[in-house]
Amino acid sequence: MATTTPTQIRIEENTKKQAVELLEGLGLNLSDAVNMFLRQVILQNGIPFEVKYPEFKPEVIEAMEEAKRISRDPNTKRYSSFSEALEDINL
C-alpha cells in the first residue's frame, strides 16, 4: 500500500454534504473520490473534464422545451398581436 499524507482542503458545507451522499451511493468515500480525481489529473496532465459555463442554465432549457411543446399544441390559443393577448388577460 502506498504511503498517504493527511491533506486539508476547504469545501462548502452543502457541497460536501451532497457529494458525500452521492459518493456513498456509489460505494466511495470522499477520500477515495479525491484520490481518483488527483490520479486522473496526473494521467490527463490537467483537469480531467471540461470546465466551462453551460450555454444555458437547465431552467432556461426546460422553459424553451416547454415553449416548443406549447407552440406545437393545436389547442393552444393564438393571438395576432400582443395587445390582443393583453385584452384577453384583462377580461
Image (cartoon, rainbow, N blue to C red):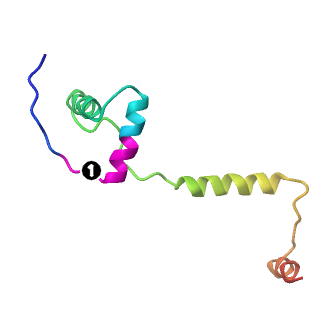
Q: Residue furthest top?
A: 1
How many marks can you see?
1
Query: Residue 9: where, in percent of width, then height?
Result: 19, 46
Asked whether 58 falls inside the magenta stretch, the response is no
Q: Which residue is mark 1?
A: 11
Q: Amino acid at mark 1?
A: Ile
Asked whether 10 falls inside the magenta stretch, the response is yes
Q: Residue at x 38, y 25 (%)?
A: 27
Query: Residue 73: where, in percent of width, then height?
Result: 85, 53
**26 over 46 or under it: above or below:** above
**91 over 56 or under it: above or below:** below
**Which image quarter holds the C terminus?**
bottom right
Q: Which residues are magenta?
A: 9-19
Secondary element at image label 1: loop
**36 over 21 or under it: above or below:** above
**Which image quarter holds the N terminus?**
top left
The image quadrant of residue 85 is: bottom right
Q: Nearer the viewer, residue 9 or 38?
A: 9
Q: In the drawing, does residue 14 fall left or right of residue 70?
A: left
**85 over 57 or under it: above or below:** below
Q: In the drawing, does residue 55 fall left or right of residue 34?
A: right
